[in-house]
Amino acid sequence: MTSPTLRIDDLRLSFRTWRGLTEVLHGVSLHIRKGERVALVGESGSGKSVTARIVLGLLQELKSSRIDGVVEFEGRDLEKLSAAERHKLRGTKMSMIFQDPTTALNPVYTIGMQFREVLGRRVKGISQRQARDVATAALADVSIRDADRILASYPFQLSGGMNQRVMIAMALANEPSLLIADEPGTALDVTVQAQTLQLMRALVERHQTAVLFISHNLGVVREFADRVYVIYKGRIVEHGTAVGLFADPRHPYTRALMEAVPHITGGGIPEIDEESAAFSAPMAVHEGCAEPGASA
Amino acid sequence: MTAPILSLQSVSKTFFLAGREVRAVDDVSIDVAEGECLAIVGESGSGKSTLANMILGVYPPTAGTIAYRGTPLPARRELKHRRLIQFVQQNPLSALNPQRSVGVSLRLALDVHGIGKKSERRAEVGRLLEEVGLPASFMTRAPAALSGGQRQRVAIARALACRSEIVVLDEPTSALDVLVQARVLRLLQELRKARGLTYVFITHDLSVVRNIAERVAVFEKGRLVETGATGTIFSTPERPYTRRLIGAVPVVTDAEMALREQLTEEFTGERNESA
Ligand SMILES: Nc1ncnc2c1ncn2[C@@H]1O[C@H](COP(=O)(O)OP(=O)(O)OP(=O)(O)O)[C@@H](O)[C@H]1O
Ligand SMILES: Nc1ncnc2c1ncn2[C@@H]1O[C@H](COP(=O)(O)OP(=O)(O)OP(=O)(O)O)[C@@H](O)[C@H]1O
Ligand SMILES: [Mg+2]
Ligand SMILES: [Mg+2]
């Protein structure tokens, strides 16, 4: 069997702070095969975004972080790549839609300039005109029609959802083999959200892209993902196919999450405890969902 | 009849960008009743945040007036107006100064608006934290040392510190997991009852809207296209855009799926008739 596009094994992360070491990830393992859409859902602050940042090699640059474990991209151990090689992967073969577009987009450059920089990573020395044409088409894919205005704008001149769509368009423009989408829909209205999901789905099918999809919206996860990992306080607590997990949530934390979802049919805001001793129950793995090459 | 707590009359906002006019908010009129939770939903880029900024007095409308209890608010707000209308935004980390402890941030809100006696403000900070369900010992914590839900509670405490009457919330829970979200939403409901607050609640999450708002206002391209009681908007939405919106909500139960399908069917049915 070919190696998965992404394989994470026993990933541990801690931060050195002035109060000592804080452990954030306690041995996370997950994998995504070519063309697979895998969701990572769970508690705010449980370590979803930091996991994504480690895959991209961004947290390694931070002096206060301590990282252990294996991260393999297309069968290659990322630790063994030079900084230059890693840098080359980012924005070309691996790309990320960041959770907060206002921090990920550079406030002092127009969208047009930032788009050209992204496209230039794949096509060296791309002309301004070429970049504009490609960017216009990419923006049209995320339902942005007035590309001229958007490309001339600075991020603060756009709405939250427009910035998010710009980021999605940039992340897809270079046809990556791994796409990490960290809360790609929070600032979008549901019709646009549905369109962007459709776009990601099309990309996955066309290029066999592997997607790591991070979201708090369980409805979206149910519609989009093939497999789901549930994370709680830096540990994976449940792993199953999307169909299996939604039909039969087994871990107490997963069940609590599902019960907390508000419904468009009404019923009020559910009353469920945020914390429970039961949430530290051992991981529940659904049939046929073992990690490949896991050190048993 | 008493005047509504907030009344917007023909409010518009035009931006000029790259030599072009952007009509971000276009002739919007709406009243907000005291004590209600009005949800504002709609397309991305339809002017919701711009409207919020005008209500908060960040910038004045290009045209139209915003009145508080019948009295038009001036373009440059005085301190007392700023005290009355407070803001809770999506990202609580960027809303709180990372250099300041939680206690200092709350204290500052009390100082700026001269709330209570100086000697009593420390105790008031502790009381505020308890009101949003946090221990008073959180005073000494830095924002980075809090979870997302805890930070959002601090942001809510700060918005309440100055005894505000109207709170504008822009996606207050979309960065939180659904469990923490439920907790924060329940807190918001309790506070509204206890303090008689009025909420203008901006969100894309229609499932949240269904369960927290009394009334919904739907925006499309800078215009207010539909308003109504929440139950009515969800069971019999009039505008095609509102139907498309509800028809696209990602859901988890079969009952919700059925509601969605029913709305979509009616919609396509009508379209075929008119064709
Ligand atoms: N640079 C840092 N220094 C210290 N602690 C950090 C740092 N970055 C993240 N953390 C901590 O690591 C934990 C995990 O953060 P992370 O951003 O991955 O959460 P998340 O699962 O993405 O949450 P959310 O759903 O709220 O986005 C949090 O408790 C956070 O405070
Ligand atoms: N400072 C500004 N300068 C120029 N144009 C602006 C400015 N602020 C907002 N706009 C424009 O006004 C329109 C409305 O933006 P606004 O942020 O109000 O939308 P929104 O409804 O909040 O959208 P979202 O749901 O995506 O947050 C957009 O076309 C945006 O580009
Ligand atoms: Mg995150
Ligand atoms: Mg907005």
Image: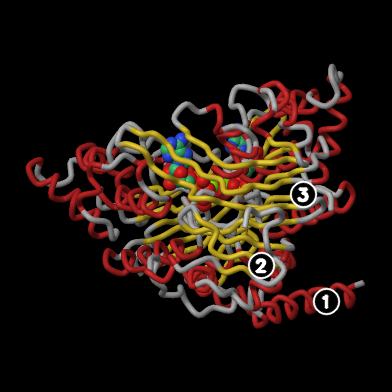
Q: Which comes before the other along the chain, label 2 or label 3? A: 3
Asked if residue B129 can be seen in this view, the reply is: yes
Q: Residue at image x 61%, y 27%?
A: A106
Task: Name which residue type carries label 1.
Answer: Glu
**Residue furthest right in the image:** B275
Q: Position of residue A109 (x, y in %)?
A: 65, 22
Q: Using the image, name the chain to which the residue with label 3 belongs.
A: A
Q: Residues within 10 Å of mark 1 (few under 14, many from 20)?
A: few
From the viewer's side, name the closer residue of B162 and B132.
B132
Residue at mark 1: B270
Asked if residue B26 can be seen in this view, the reply is: no
Q: Is residue B109 above or below residue B1?
A: above
Residue at mark 3: A4
Residue at mark 2: A240
From the viewer's side, name the closer residue of A61 and B188.
A61
- Measured in 3D between alpha carbons, the distance from the residue under mark 3 to the one under mark 1, in whole angstroms, is 48 Å
Q: Using the image, name the chain to which the residue with label 1 belongs.
A: B
Q: Using the image, name the chain to which the residue with label 2 belongs.
A: A
Q: Are the residues flagged by discs 3 and 1 in contact, CB closer than 8 Å? A: no
**Residue furthest front in the image:** A296
Q: Are marks 3 and 1 on the same chain?
A: no
Q: Residue at image x 52%, y 37%?
A: A67
Which label lies toward us, 1 or 2? 2
Q: Are the residues flagged by discs 1 and 2 in contact, CB closer than 8 Å? A: no
Task: Name which residue type carries label 3.
Answer: Pro
- Measured in 3D between alpha carbons, the distance from the residue under mark 1 to the one under mark 2, in whole angstroms, is 41 Å
Task: Name which residue type carries label 2.
Answer: Gly
From the viewer's side, name the closer residue of B102 and A146.
B102
